[in-house]
Image: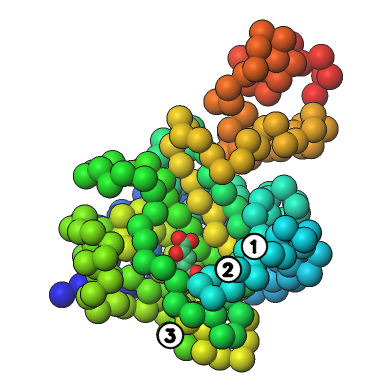
Amino acid sequence: MSREPKRMVFDYANWERLPEREIAGFFAACDEEMDAVGVVVLAEAIAHEDCDAFVELINGEIRRASPIERLANERRIQVTGPTVYNMQARHPKFMAHIAYRPVIDYFRRFLGAGMTLYSCEGRVTPPGTGDGNWHHDGHERIPNYYMTMNSLHYLCDSNKENGATRYIPGTHKEFIPVADAAKREAKYIDVKKGDIVLFNPYLIHSGSANRTDNDRPIIINYYCRPYMKTEFNYPRMMSYVEASKLTDDQRRLLGFEQMMLEDLHELYRLGSCRKALADMNPYGF
Ligand SMILES: O=C(O)CCC(=O)C(=O)O
């Protein structure tokens, strides 16, 4: 019988100052969770004031949605709620958050140092939204090999009443068809505002119905191996000036080091984003 996930309490705020062995010990405990349960719950890893600021930004984007986004969100409302793509391109706060160290340091252990961001989405599940569709993340299920890893960032308490993420225990190891898993009993992940849940990509899961009168907002930061196609072509969406402000981690996560160049000209024009060609940067960044 699968046990409940533990809430992993840690000094997330001081991550970059902690000794390596402390982080290694923490990761070993996370690995046990990932193996036994299929999820790792990072307890209150995001400060409450940051959660509130993220909610404000997501709601602002939903209010200002273009007609096509609005239409997509109306169709989506029964199963997920309005979703805003590319949050990292819309606000610096999200751009900083895609490189949140406790998450990327953990995921890089599975997906490699060149891991890239597949997508960064903001989502609000409003009152009345029904259960989500059962699925596992990633592409093929390959034993002992992950191609993608997902992290859900809860911006309010989330439980069975207001749309908790639910999952079918054991499916991260059994690899059964999704339709068969859906006939089994689900568990609901009870999380607090500021928790981040890291997923074994093969665990069959979904969102669930929001039966309360309040929205349930989350961020979904999804990462993949460096050789995979990402949801958007991030380097091409950015100007030189924007790109010049990225940290090394952000640049790598956005795929600057593995982007497919259009032609030889681009090797010199954009190649300057790669460390090996940095001295060819005509703009002097
Ligand atoms: O809204 C949720 O809790 C689930 C989201 C989800 O299933 C996903 O992003 O893969």
Q: Position of residue 262 (x, y in %)?
A: 65, 17
Where residue 183 sits: x, y (%)? Answer: 23, 75
Tell me which residue sits at (21%, 67%) in the image. 180
Count of numbered circles on the image: 3
Mark 2: amino acid: Arg
Q: Earlier in the sequence, mark 3 or mark 2?
A: 2
Q: Earlier in the sequence, mark 3 or mark 1?
A: 1
Label 3, on which residue? 160
Residue at x-position 45% and y-position 55% = 150
The three-letter code of the residue at mark 1 reads Ala
Q: Which residue is mark 1?
A: 72
Q: Which residue is painted at 78% across and 59% down in the image? A: 66
Mark 3 in CB contact with mark 2 (< 8 angstroms): no
Q: Viewer-proximal residue, 179 or 115?
A: 179
Q: Is residue 34 visible?
A: no
Q: Please state which amino acid type lies under the numbered disc 3.
A: Lys
Give the image location of residue 133, x and y in percent.
41, 68
Q: Is residue 27 left or right of residue 274?
A: left
Disc number at residue 76?
2
CA–CA distance in space, label 3 to label 2: 20 Å
Left or right: 196, with 219 as reference point: left
Is 170 on the left-hand or right-hand side of 262? left
The answer to whether residue 55 of the structure is visible from this angle is yes
Other residues around mark 2 within 10 Å, as few (<14) / some (14–19) / many (≥20): some
Spatial separation of the CA atoms under disc 2 and disc 1? 6 Å
